[in-house]
Image (tube, rainbow, N blue to C red):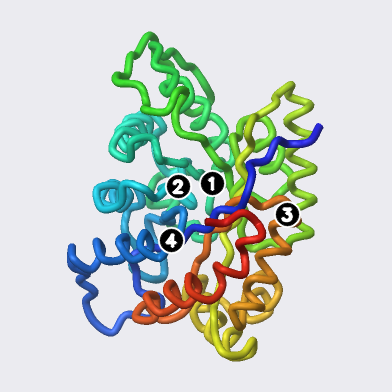
Amino acid sequence: MNLVLGEGLRIGIQTIHRRTEPATGPWLPTIDELVAFVELVDRCGYDSLWVGDHISFPVPIFDPLLQLAQAAVVSRRLILGTSVLLLPLRHPTPVAKQVTTLDHLTEGRLILGVGVGGEFPREYAACDVPHNERGARLAEGVQVLKKFFSGESVSHQGRFYGPFEDVPMRPPPRQPGGPPVWFAGRKESALRRIGRLGDGYLAYVITPDMYRTALEKIAAAADEAGRTPKPFGTGHLLFTRLDNTYETALDRATETLSVRYAMDFRMAAARYCALGTPAQVAERIHEFHAAGVRHVVLDLLGPYEERRRQIEWFATDALPLLRDLGTS
Protein backbone atom coordinates (compact mmCIF):
# COMPACT_ATOMS: atom_id res chain seq x y z
CA MET A 1 0.00 0.00 0.00
CA ASN A 2 1.00 3.65 -0.26
CA LEU A 3 1.04 5.79 2.86
CA VAL A 4 -1.44 8.67 2.79
CA LEU A 5 0.70 11.80 3.01
CA GLY A 6 -0.34 15.31 3.97
CA GLU A 7 -0.64 18.08 1.42
CA GLY A 8 1.78 20.94 0.99
CA LEU A 9 5.04 21.48 2.85
CA ARG A 10 5.42 22.82 6.37
CA ILE A 11 8.65 24.32 7.63
CA GLY A 12 9.58 24.27 11.30
CA ILE A 13 12.49 25.30 13.49
CA GLN A 14 14.28 22.95 15.85
CA THR A 15 15.60 24.73 18.87
CA ILE A 16 17.31 23.29 21.86
CA HIS A 17 17.96 26.10 24.29
CA ARG A 18 21.60 25.26 24.65
CA ARG A 19 25.05 26.35 23.74
CA THR A 20 26.40 24.92 20.52
CA GLU A 21 30.05 25.39 21.42
CA PRO A 22 32.10 24.48 24.51
CA ALA A 23 31.01 26.44 27.57
CA THR A 24 33.25 29.30 28.71
CA GLY A 25 31.18 30.18 31.74
CA PRO A 26 27.71 29.73 33.21
CA TRP A 27 24.85 29.93 30.71
CA LEU A 28 21.90 31.69 32.28
CA PRO A 29 19.20 32.37 29.67
CA THR A 30 16.49 34.75 30.76
CA ILE A 31 12.73 34.38 30.44
CA ASP A 32 12.71 37.31 28.02
CA GLU A 33 15.35 35.63 25.86
CA LEU A 34 13.40 32.39 25.59
CA VAL A 35 10.11 34.20 24.94
CA ALA A 36 11.74 36.38 22.29
CA PHE A 37 12.95 33.29 20.45
CA VAL A 38 9.43 31.82 20.15
CA GLU A 39 8.09 35.20 19.05
CA LEU A 40 10.80 35.39 16.38
CA VAL A 41 9.93 31.99 14.92
CA ASP A 42 6.24 32.88 14.92
CA ARG A 43 6.78 36.33 13.39
CA CYS A 44 9.01 34.99 10.61
CA GLY A 45 6.19 32.77 9.35
CA TYR A 46 7.39 29.29 10.23
CA ASP A 47 4.79 26.60 10.84
CA SER A 48 6.20 24.81 13.87
CA LEU A 49 8.70 24.78 16.72
CA TRP A 50 10.45 21.61 17.89
CA VAL A 51 12.73 20.68 20.77
CA GLY A 52 15.09 17.77 21.28
CA ASP A 53 15.76 15.69 24.35
CA HIS A 54 18.67 14.28 26.31
CA ILE A 55 19.24 13.68 29.98
CA SER A 56 22.99 14.06 29.49
CA PHE A 57 24.56 15.74 26.47
CA PRO A 58 27.94 17.26 25.53
CA VAL A 59 26.39 20.77 25.61
CA PRO A 60 23.78 22.29 27.98
CA ILE A 61 20.19 21.28 27.16
CA PHE A 62 16.77 21.78 28.79
CA ASP A 63 13.81 19.42 29.24
CA PRO A 64 11.65 19.38 26.06
CA LEU A 65 8.16 19.19 27.59
CA LEU A 66 8.81 22.10 29.92
CA GLN A 67 10.12 24.20 27.04
CA LEU A 68 7.03 23.50 24.96
CA ALA A 69 4.75 24.41 27.87
CA GLN A 70 6.38 27.84 27.92
CA ALA A 71 6.28 28.17 24.13
CA ALA A 72 2.55 27.37 24.08
CA VAL A 73 1.84 30.49 26.11
CA VAL A 74 3.92 32.68 23.81
CA SER A 75 2.56 31.51 20.44
CA ARG A 76 -1.07 30.58 19.85
CA ARG A 77 -0.35 29.55 16.23
CA LEU A 78 2.76 27.37 15.99
CA ILE A 79 2.55 23.58 15.96
CA LEU A 80 4.78 22.32 18.78
CA GLY A 81 6.67 19.04 18.74
CA THR A 82 9.36 16.92 20.35
CA SER A 83 12.17 15.79 18.09
CA VAL A 84 12.42 13.49 19.79
CA LEU A 85 11.44 12.52 23.34
CA LEU A 86 13.59 9.58 24.48
CA LEU A 87 10.68 7.64 25.88
CA PRO A 88 12.65 4.53 27.00
CA LEU A 89 14.41 6.67 29.63
CA ARG A 90 11.05 7.32 31.35
CA HIS A 91 8.10 5.34 32.67
CA PRO A 92 5.25 5.85 30.19
CA THR A 93 2.47 6.36 32.75
CA PRO A 94 3.70 9.72 34.14
CA VAL A 95 4.73 10.66 30.58
CA ALA A 96 1.11 10.05 29.52
CA LYS A 97 -0.03 12.54 32.17
CA GLN A 98 2.57 15.11 31.10
CA VAL A 99 1.79 14.76 27.39
CA THR A 100 -1.96 14.89 27.99
CA THR A 101 -1.51 18.07 30.01
CA LEU A 102 0.69 19.58 27.32
CA ASP A 103 -1.88 18.71 24.65
CA HIS A 104 -4.35 20.87 26.56
CA LEU A 105 -1.84 23.68 27.19
CA THR A 106 -1.16 23.80 23.43
CA GLU A 107 -4.89 23.54 22.63
CA GLY A 108 -4.23 20.48 20.51
CA ARG A 109 -1.20 21.78 18.59
CA LEU A 110 1.14 19.03 19.82
CA ILE A 111 3.01 16.34 17.88
CA LEU A 112 4.79 13.78 20.05
CA GLY A 113 7.99 12.65 18.39
CA VAL A 114 9.59 9.67 20.13
CA GLY A 115 12.79 7.71 19.69
CA VAL A 116 15.47 5.69 21.41
CA GLY A 117 18.60 7.84 21.08
CA GLY A 118 21.42 5.62 22.18
CA GLU A 119 24.40 7.74 21.14
CA PHE A 120 25.20 8.35 24.80
CA PRO A 121 24.91 5.08 26.75
CA ARG A 122 25.78 6.78 30.04
CA GLU A 123 22.42 8.56 30.13
CA TYR A 124 20.76 5.14 29.95
CA ALA A 125 22.94 3.94 32.82
CA ALA A 126 22.04 7.03 34.84
CA CYS A 127 18.33 6.26 34.36
CA ASP A 128 18.85 2.59 35.30
CA VAL A 129 17.63 1.45 31.88
CA PRO A 130 19.60 -1.26 30.02
CA HIS A 131 20.86 0.21 26.75
CA ASN A 132 20.03 -2.94 24.79
CA GLU A 133 16.34 -2.77 25.83
CA ARG A 134 15.66 0.67 24.40
CA GLY A 135 13.81 -0.43 21.25
CA ALA A 136 11.53 -2.87 23.05
CA ARG A 137 10.84 -0.34 25.81
CA LEU A 138 9.91 2.27 23.22
CA ALA A 139 7.39 -0.04 21.55
CA GLU A 140 5.74 -1.05 24.82
CA GLY A 141 5.89 2.49 26.17
CA VAL A 142 3.96 3.84 23.18
CA GLN A 143 1.34 1.12 23.65
CA VAL A 144 0.87 2.28 27.26
CA LEU A 145 0.67 5.92 26.17
CA LYS A 146 -2.01 5.20 23.59
CA LYS A 147 -4.06 3.22 26.10
CA PHE A 148 -4.11 6.23 28.42
CA PHE A 149 -4.80 8.59 25.52
CA SER A 150 -8.05 6.68 24.87
CA GLY A 151 -9.67 8.21 27.94
CA GLU A 152 -10.71 4.77 29.18
CA SER A 153 -9.48 3.06 32.35
CA VAL A 154 -6.25 1.27 31.52
CA SER A 155 -4.98 -2.20 32.36
CA HIS A 156 -1.58 -3.37 31.22
CA GLN A 157 0.79 -6.24 31.81
CA GLY A 158 3.91 -6.26 29.68
CA ARG A 159 7.56 -7.11 29.73
CA PHE A 160 8.65 -3.78 31.25
CA TYR A 161 5.53 -2.06 32.60
CA GLY A 162 2.74 -3.36 34.80
CA PRO A 163 0.84 -5.21 35.89
CA PHE A 164 -1.79 -2.63 36.77
CA GLU A 165 -5.56 -2.73 36.33
CA ASP A 166 -8.40 -0.28 35.75
CA VAL A 167 -6.37 2.90 36.15
CA PRO A 168 -8.27 6.01 34.99
CA MET A 169 -6.42 9.12 33.85
CA ARG A 170 -8.55 12.21 33.39
CA PRO A 171 -8.95 14.39 31.48
CA PRO A 172 -8.11 12.65 28.22
CA PRO A 173 -5.96 14.57 25.70
CA ARG A 174 -7.40 17.47 23.76
CA GLN A 175 -6.89 15.69 20.43
CA PRO A 176 -9.14 12.61 20.14
CA GLY A 177 -6.97 9.57 20.71
CA GLY A 178 -4.10 11.79 21.80
CA PRO A 179 -1.48 13.76 19.89
CA PRO A 180 -0.05 11.99 16.83
CA VAL A 181 3.00 9.90 17.70
CA TRP A 182 5.83 10.24 15.17
CA PHE A 183 8.74 7.84 15.48
CA ALA A 184 12.39 8.44 14.69
CA GLY A 185 14.64 5.63 13.51
CA ARG A 186 16.72 4.32 10.64
CA LYS A 187 17.29 0.63 11.30
CA GLU A 188 15.09 -2.07 9.80
CA SER A 189 13.61 -2.91 13.21
CA ALA A 190 12.78 0.75 13.83
CA LEU A 191 11.04 1.13 10.46
CA ARG A 192 8.95 -1.99 11.10
CA ARG A 193 7.99 -0.57 14.50
CA ILE A 194 6.83 2.66 12.87
CA GLY A 195 4.65 0.70 10.45
CA ARG A 196 3.05 -1.21 13.35
CA LEU A 197 2.59 1.67 15.78
CA GLY A 198 3.38 5.06 14.30
CA ASP A 199 1.24 7.96 13.15
CA GLY A 200 4.25 9.45 11.39
CA TYR A 201 7.96 9.24 10.63
CA LEU A 202 10.48 11.84 11.82
CA ALA A 203 13.86 11.10 10.27
CA TYR A 204 17.28 12.64 10.60
CA VAL A 205 20.77 12.10 9.19
CA ILE A 206 19.56 10.39 6.02
CA THR A 207 19.51 11.31 2.33
CA PRO A 208 16.39 11.82 0.19
CA ASP A 209 16.90 8.40 -1.41
CA MET A 210 17.18 6.80 2.03
CA TYR A 211 13.99 8.58 3.09
CA ARG A 212 12.07 7.27 0.09
CA THR A 213 13.23 3.72 0.80
CA ALA A 214 12.33 4.07 4.49
CA LEU A 215 8.77 5.08 3.62
CA GLU A 216 8.43 1.99 1.42
CA LYS A 217 9.53 -0.23 4.31
CA ILE A 218 7.19 1.52 6.75
CA ALA A 219 4.29 1.09 4.33
CA ALA A 220 5.06 -2.62 3.96
CA ALA A 221 5.13 -3.08 7.74
CA ALA A 222 1.85 -1.16 8.14
CA ASP A 223 0.24 -3.32 5.47
CA GLU A 224 1.47 -6.48 7.17
CA ALA A 225 0.00 -5.26 10.46
CA GLY A 226 -3.32 -4.44 8.79
CA ARG A 227 -3.00 -0.72 9.47
CA THR A 228 -3.82 2.25 7.26
CA PRO A 229 -2.68 5.30 9.22
CA LYS A 230 -4.40 8.38 7.70
CA PRO A 231 -2.93 10.83 7.21
CA PHE A 232 0.59 9.63 7.87
CA GLY A 233 2.96 12.37 9.00
CA THR A 234 6.27 12.56 7.16
CA GLY A 235 8.85 14.76 8.84
CA HIS A 236 12.57 15.21 8.56
CA LEU A 237 14.96 16.99 10.92
CA LEU A 238 17.37 18.67 8.51
CA PHE A 239 20.68 20.06 9.71
CA THR A 240 20.97 23.37 7.85
CA ARG A 241 23.49 26.18 7.54
CA LEU A 242 23.07 29.25 5.37
CA ASP A 243 26.18 31.04 4.21
CA ASN A 244 27.60 32.89 1.24
CA THR A 245 29.29 29.75 -0.08
CA TYR A 246 28.84 26.01 0.30
CA GLU A 247 32.35 25.53 1.68
CA THR A 248 31.90 28.15 4.40
CA ALA A 249 28.58 26.58 5.38
CA LEU A 250 30.20 23.14 5.51
CA ASP A 251 32.97 24.46 7.77
CA ARG A 252 30.50 25.97 10.23
CA ALA A 253 28.22 22.94 10.20
CA THR A 254 31.19 20.68 10.87
CA GLU A 255 32.29 22.79 13.83
CA THR A 256 28.83 22.68 15.45
CA LEU A 257 28.05 19.01 14.86
CA SER A 258 31.52 17.76 15.81
CA VAL A 259 31.09 19.36 19.25
CA ARG A 260 27.50 18.19 19.60
CA TYR A 261 28.25 14.55 18.81
CA ALA A 262 31.85 14.40 20.07
CA MET A 263 33.21 13.14 16.73
CA ASP A 264 34.48 14.46 13.40
CA PHE A 265 31.26 15.17 11.53
CA ARG A 266 32.62 16.68 8.29
CA MET A 267 31.92 13.77 5.94
CA ALA A 268 28.46 13.24 7.45
CA ALA A 269 27.70 16.95 7.21
CA ALA A 270 28.57 16.97 3.52
CA ARG A 271 26.27 14.01 2.90
CA TYR A 272 23.26 14.77 5.07
CA CYS A 273 22.99 18.54 5.65
CA ALA A 274 21.43 21.35 3.62
CA LEU A 275 24.28 23.82 3.17
CA GLY A 276 25.21 26.95 1.30
CA THR A 277 23.24 29.82 -0.20
CA PRO A 278 19.47 30.09 0.20
CA ALA A 279 19.06 28.69 -3.32
CA GLN A 280 21.26 25.67 -2.53
CA VAL A 281 19.40 24.98 0.71
CA ALA A 282 16.01 25.32 -1.00
CA GLU A 283 17.12 22.89 -3.70
CA ARG A 284 17.98 20.31 -1.04
CA ILE A 285 14.55 20.74 0.57
CA HIS A 286 12.92 20.21 -2.83
CA GLU A 287 14.77 16.88 -3.03
CA PHE A 288 13.37 15.79 0.34
CA HIS A 289 9.87 16.88 -0.64
CA ALA A 290 10.11 14.74 -3.78
CA ALA A 291 11.08 11.81 -1.53
CA GLY A 292 7.88 12.22 0.53
CA VAL A 293 8.74 14.72 3.27
CA ARG A 294 5.86 17.05 4.13
CA HIS A 295 7.23 18.63 7.30
CA VAL A 296 10.84 19.84 7.28
CA VAL A 297 12.26 20.75 10.68
CA LEU A 298 15.34 22.96 10.34
CA ASP A 299 18.14 22.62 12.85
CA LEU A 300 20.03 25.79 11.97
CA LEU A 301 23.68 25.24 12.78
CA GLY A 302 26.34 27.60 14.06
CA PRO A 303 27.11 29.52 17.23
CA TYR A 304 24.21 30.18 19.59
CA GLU A 305 24.59 33.90 19.02
CA GLU A 306 23.92 33.52 15.26
CA ARG A 307 20.53 31.77 15.60
CA ARG A 308 18.48 34.92 15.05
CA ARG A 309 20.28 35.87 11.83
CA GLN A 310 19.96 32.34 10.42
CA ILE A 311 16.22 32.19 11.20
CA GLU A 312 15.57 35.58 9.61
CA TRP A 313 17.80 34.88 6.59
CA PHE A 314 16.05 31.59 5.80
CA ALA A 315 12.63 33.20 6.17
CA THR A 316 13.55 36.12 3.91
CA ASP A 317 15.51 34.38 1.14
CA ALA A 318 14.81 30.63 1.24
CA LEU A 319 11.12 30.36 2.15
CA PRO A 320 10.00 32.21 -1.00
CA LEU A 321 11.85 29.59 -3.07
CA LEU A 322 9.65 26.86 -1.52
CA ARG A 323 6.23 28.38 -2.19
CA ASP A 324 5.74 26.11 -5.20
CA LEU A 325 5.58 23.24 -2.67
CA GLY A 326 2.61 24.76 -0.87
CA THR A 327 4.41 26.56 1.94
CA SER A 328 2.75 29.59 3.48
Q: Residues within 10 Å of mark 1 (few under 14, many from 20)?
A: many
**Vertical relation: 199 (above or below) 66:** above
According to the picture, the residue beneath numbered tag 1 turns out to be 115
Q: What numbered label is drawn on residue 45?
A: 4
Q: CA distance from mark 3 to mark 4?
A: 26 Å
- The residue at 32%/53% (across/down) is 63
Secondary structure type for disc 2 = strand
Q: Nearer the viewer, residue 86 or 231?
A: 231
Q: Nearer the viewer, residue 231 or 55?
A: 231
Sooner in the amino-acid sequence: mark 4 or mark 2: 4
Which label lies toward us, 3 or 1? 3
Q: Is residue 92 visible?
A: yes
Which label lies toward us, 1 or 4? 4
**Vertical relation: 223 (above or below) 49:** above
Sooner in the amino-acid sequence: mark 3 or mark 4: 4
Secondary structure type for disc 3 = helix
Sooner in the amino-acid sequence: mark 3 or mark 1: 1
Q: CA distance from mark 4 to mark 2?
A: 25 Å
According to the picture, the residue beneath numbered tag 3 turns out to be 211
